[in-house]
Image (cartoon, rainbow, N blue to C red):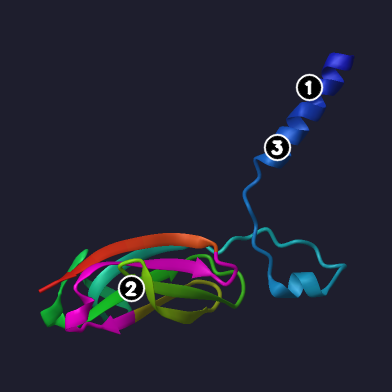
Amino acid sequence: MKYHTVLTLSLSLLMLLCQPLRAQSPSDTDDAAATDIVTDIVLVQAEMCEDIQELTPQNTTTVFSIERRKAVCFTSFDPVPFETEIYHHWFHRDRRSARIKLALQPPRWSTYSSIQLRAEDLGPWRVEVTDAKGRIFQILRFSITE
């Protein structure tokens, strides 16, 4: 009997520990009687590209020519259970160049940010896609060449 009780408790604890991290809607925390909504915002696509047309990335790449004069970071989220914000943090040689705040709307949302390329922008870059709390969804690395 003791073995059965220990096994049941162990399995219950294991199931509790293996549950995925959850994001809560801001309205959930406002109402103490509300039940938890167990839904995450999920990044389903993140790409560096030369342009966006009709909300579709064009010419995805990891190497941008300075002659193109623009680099674009495209992100798509599904599901988006509640209105929220994400950030595109642009880094050149490990130094933040831009922090761009972007709004997401339910039920799914695609968005992008871009930078204009200058001669001093040659070299390695990255974009960190994060939520408002700093959780990193993805890091996209790319280079700018002549």
User: Mark 1: few, some, or many residues within 10 Å (few <14, many ≥20)?
Assistant: few
Q: Residue at x 87, y 67 (%)?
A: 33
Closer to us: 129 or 92:
92
- Residue 95 place in picture, x, y as percent: 37, 71
Name the residue type under label 3: Met
* Residue at mark 2 to residue at mark 3: CA–CA distance: 37 Å
Q: Position of residue 84 (x, y in %)?
A: 58, 76
Question: Magenta segment: does it hold 122?
Answer: yes
Snapshot quadrant of residue 97: bottom left
Res 17 quadrant in image = top right
Of circles 2 and 3, the one toward us is: 2
Q: Which residue is mark 1?
A: 7
Q: CA distance from mark 1 to mark 2?
A: 49 Å
Give the position of the N terminus as an image quadrant.
top right
As drawn, is 67 to the left or to the right of 112?
Answer: left
At label 2, which amino acid type do we have? Cys
- Characterize the local packing of mark 2: few (<14), some (14-19) or many (20 or more) Cα atoms within 10 angstroms: many
Sequence-wise, which precedes: disc 2 or disc 3? 3
**Of helix, strand and loop, which one carries label 3?**
helix
Dot 2 corresponds to which residue?
73
Q: Give the mark nearer the N terminus: 1 vs 3.
A: 1
Q: Secondary structure at mark 2?
A: strand
Which span is picked out in magenta?
A: 114-134
Does residue 54 show up?
no
Query: In the image, is residue 110 above or below residue 3?
Result: below
Q: Amino acid at mark 1?
A: Leu
Q: Tell me the residue that label 3 is attached to.
A: 15
Q: Earlier in the sequence, mark 1 or mark 2?
A: 1
Q: Residue at x 41, y 66 (%)?
A: 128
